[in-house]
Amino acid sequence: MLPTATYRTTAFVEAARRLGVDLTVASEEPSTFEASRPDALLTLEFSHPTRAADQARAFATRHQVDGVLGVDDDTVIVAAEIARALGLAGNDVAAVEAARDKYRQRVLMQQHGVAIPSFQLHRLDEDLEGIARSVAYPCVVKPLRLSASRGVIRADDPRAFVDAVQRLAAILKQPDAAACADAAASFLVEQYVPGVEVALEGLLTSGALHVLALFDKPDPLQGPFFEETIYATPSMLPAATQRALRDTAAHAARAIGLTRGPVHAELRWNERGPWLIELAARPIGGRCGAALRFQDGATLEEVVIREALGLPLGSLSREDAASGVMMIPVPGAGILREVRGVAEARAVPGVEDVVITAHRGQALVPWPEGSRYPGFIFARGRAPAEVVSALRAAHRRLTFVRDRQTD
Amino acid sequence: MASSEIRITAEPVDQRRCKFLVDRPVYQGVRRFASRAEAPGSPLAEALYAIPGVSEVIVSANLVTVVKDTDDPWQAMGKSVGAAIRQALAGEAPAVVEKAAATSAGRLSDDELYERVNDLFEQQVNPMVARHGGRVELIDVQDAVVLLRMGGGCQGCGMASVTLRQGIEGIVMEHLPEVKGIVDVTDHASGANPYFASAKK
């Protein structure tokens, strides 16, 4: 299931072709070719997973379905519903729904003793001044369902807390966020955990977690907003620390009830040990999957499709080279007119690709209101430090020419 | 022409395929070199096939698409490709010469396939993609491989690869099983009005 707004379409479609898999792409909007290619294209109501499962059941009466795969936070729930309806292998629906909801996943993790920051759930219409007086600082205000750290804001005192919640409330009134219904009426307040942050990309098989990559995040994420920048792997953290982080992620997946498929976790590490910050039942977001390549030459998407179909997984060991990706920071608000320096950025030794995903005329929106990176830079090298240097050097060569937005 | 002034932008499509956008015309038309055997006579193809791992070359106006069969990163191979393009353009002879007319024995010639694919595009494909403000242009058919370019709402669309692989390719293969493959030579990065813009994780 590929939402029309996902960055990952080409990677999954081409991965299926390389594997020789007969692919049916389901989206929430109809393709112009659906009527003439009914075996290859399908429209499903992603916003109503049970209805989507009924639609898939009808489809399956006419076409053979061997596996079902969602690629983002919403479609993994639809995939679980369809797997249940068709008797296919898949995660438990309740587990993926819990993974989708920041509060529910925290409750489960807390019940199972996973190391997580303390948290509280509040409604936006509560007395914010009153909450502000009872909160321990620094804290982080979070929406329940938005992704890419959109709406996530750190507050260091009561005044900043009230400002942060009001800013989040405005974000949650935007049409796409408001579609989250009840989830858009509440928010989380979470203890801010200092320390280094990593991202863990994993694959669950029969409940066991295989770590595909542990990414260091060399740019400190201290807030007040949490826009991602660089991921680099292999991690340079000590082996014992990496094991502890892996064990925490595995513990979290078990607590939520996930047993199979890709997981992406954000964790922190400080003098008190590992902390699970977020866990999602999907692969890494954006174009970042291209930073991963395995010993047998497979891409992350190939591994994920193999798992969904029960095919031999091949090597789950990452290539020998260090690899990294930079999610290009939004340079500021405005309408994108031109990106300069792409060729120069690509020419930086170690840089493999510079992908500009924003198109001319697109509104660039900084965090926390925004969640769309204008592009991605990929690099490989002998060591993570070399990769990080290449990513930074390439980024310095880029100039985003933009007009100020007047509307 | 000073070859050192030639600006080339690499646009990797995936691990195997990379587009090189040259700041000037390379060839007035489209030519695909499916193997090293087709390269002699065209300095650009000869130079590119001299690079270890190159398995296919497609030249379309100012776009050179290179396919490789190695796992070497494009960053490493791209420099050799850039040097080959500059070398070919610096010479006196045309970088690419027109392909000799194919002789067909018992199968549709590329010219015949071109006509049929073109009819299919006009009658079925383009009326459909027009609903999303898109259009698909048949560039050429070479060795039974269809070269096309996507425009309008299709150019840069987040679902362009779905339209291509799940829609257009299926229709073409269903009606013309002689077609061996479809290559998209679109510069999607320049699409300014994509029907679906990528926006989420």
Image (cartoon, rainbow, N blue to C red):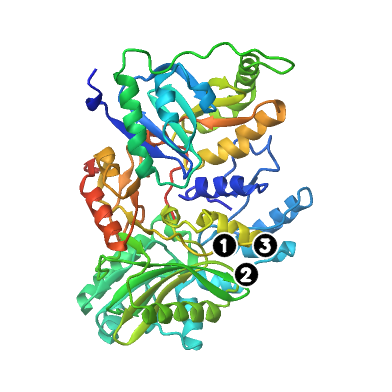
Q: Choose between A315 and A230: the one closer to the eye.
A: A315
Q: Choose between A314 and A402: the one closer to the eye.
A: A314
Mark 1 near mark 3, Cβ–Cβ under 8 Å? no
Amino acid type, callout 3: Gly
Which percent across, then down, holds residue A166?
Answer: 29, 67
Where B87 sits versus A171, above or below? above
Which percent across, then down, holds residue B96?
Answer: 42, 17
The chain letter under disc 3 is A
Query: Mark 3 or mark 1, which is nearer the start of the sequence?
Result: 1
Q: Residue at x 55, y 80 (%)?
A: A254
Marks 2 and 1 on same chain:
yes
Q: Is residue A21 left or right of residue A338?
A: right
Reading the image, the residue beneath label 2 is A91
Amino acid type, callout 1: Val
Mark 1, secondary structure of its residue: helix
Residue furthest out toward the right: A61
Where B101 sits versus B193, above or below? above
Q: Residue at x 56, y 46 (%)?
A: A13
Mark 2, secondary structure of its residue: loop
Q: Is residue B17 left or right of residue B6?
A: right
Reading the image, the residue beneath label 3 is A310
Q: Disc 1 and disc 3: Cα gap in Å?
A: 17 Å
